[in-house]
Image (cartoon, rainbow, N blue to C red):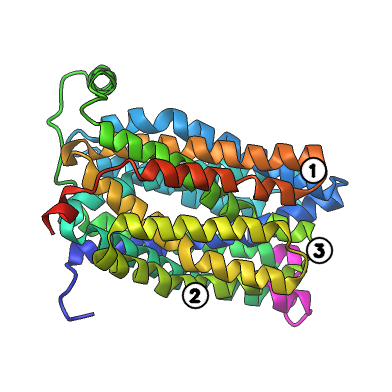
Amino acid sequence: MGKGKYTKTEKSWMFYDWANSAYSIIITTAVFPIFYKSVATEAGVGLTQSTAYLGYTVAIATFILAMIGPILGTIADYKGLKKKFFFAFFLLGSLSTVSLAFVPEGTWLPLLIIYTITAIGFHGANIFYDAFLVDVTPEEKMDEVSSRGFGLGYIGSTIPFIISIAIILLAKQEVIPLSTTVATKLAFVITGIWWFTFTIPMLKNVVQIHAIEREPNILASSFRRLGETFKEIKKYRTVFIFLLAYFFYIDGVGTIISMSTAYGTDLGIEPTDLLIVLFVTQVVAAPFAILYGRLAQRFSVKTMLYVGIFVYIIVCIYAFFLSTTLDFWILAMLVATSQGGIQALSRSYFAQLVPKEKSNEFFGFYNIFGKFASVMGPLLLGVTATLTGSSAYGVFSLVILFIIGGILLRMVPKPESEIAA
């Protein structure tokens, strides 16, 4: 990276990925699911059933966000409101993450309730964070900046993850005078503090540039504007075809991320092995996320999205036959090559397609399509696991979603920035 390649605003925006990715790995993917599974098991809940309950919880949280996303995004398009909404959700997410540490021992239902609140804060803040992409960088740099953000996120998340895992393992080996439960709860506190602290550059240096002038009745006007967007849906045909494609393929991506450790636990993989695998996954994913951004400049964004979809199809098929810790390692490394890239390029591709002054409104739709997909995926996995008694069938069923997403993506024209190039 050459000196001065990124502006202070771009760096501050990218740094939020560094801040909130600790939540993604510790709460969404690694420590919390393992902790929840152990608490639920001790309370007499079966392995498959506890996985299903976690799937239902993810579905509830994402359904709530899907309902409020577009209208909040539409309101936030008014001048001066985007950062206020971002701050409110970020604060909700980071503080509720810390509060996970204060849930009484042995109670699994309160854990899931607080987890729902953390997810609403995390994903709600991301609506406005993603929409800020149009304010911090020009179109020709969006793919690179978005991918670099994901890369920083993977790198940054490894630091609190290593600290948390070290504390948990040392407690487990009785090297430090803490129980494993207390050590795990300390990881939740570390996550919330890390998230809060490293969001400060974003709050200080990123401002809303593209906006709509405020009107007398903001709420009523927002509903009116939202209705006008639906009436003019043909005008935004390209955007909505992309959202439909995104709906299908991101469903599989999100479900695999949020349910991977629960699935590994069902297969009998030791918690320590799971945590080590997930740590290495973060390390490997960082350069691949950046690589996706660079390859997108050479081969086009759509081409790299197809690559990501294909890799995930292989992941779903391989997961069906997974039986050993080595299999889980192979699966995790496959996921690491593409999970950051497919998310980063989806974000930047969409940012290039939407009108900048309505970015929050459209990222609200981006959120609702992504969240409805996240309702469908975990529900599909949960119901299939309950009916068949095997989580493997639920993971395998995600293949069809990636195939449909890839087919729909072919119908989306290139963004103007690629055509100009």
Residue lying farthest to the right in this orientation:
44
Q: Which residue is mark 2?
A: 284
* Residue 70, image quadrant: top left
Mark 1: secondary structure:
helix
**In front here: 74 or 117?**
74
- Give how far apart the Cα atoms at labels 3 and 1 are: 15 Å
Q: Is any part of residue 200 visible from this angle?
A: yes
Assess whether residue 169 is covered by the magenta stretch: yes
Mark on residue 268? 3
* Spot occupied by residue 291 in the image (x, y as percentages of width and height): 35, 71
Query: Residue at image x 50%, y 75%?
Result: 283
Q: Give, as a three-letter code, the residue at label 2.
A: Val
Badge 2 crowding class, 10 Å Cα cut-off, few under 14, some 14 to 19, many 20 or more, is: many
The quarter of the displayed image where residue 277 is located: bottom right
Q: Earlier in the sequence, mark 3 or mark 2?
A: 3
Query: Disc 2 to disc 1, how far (Cα)?
Result: 32 Å
Residue 33, quarter of the rendered image? bottom right
The part of the chain drawn in magenta is 168-182
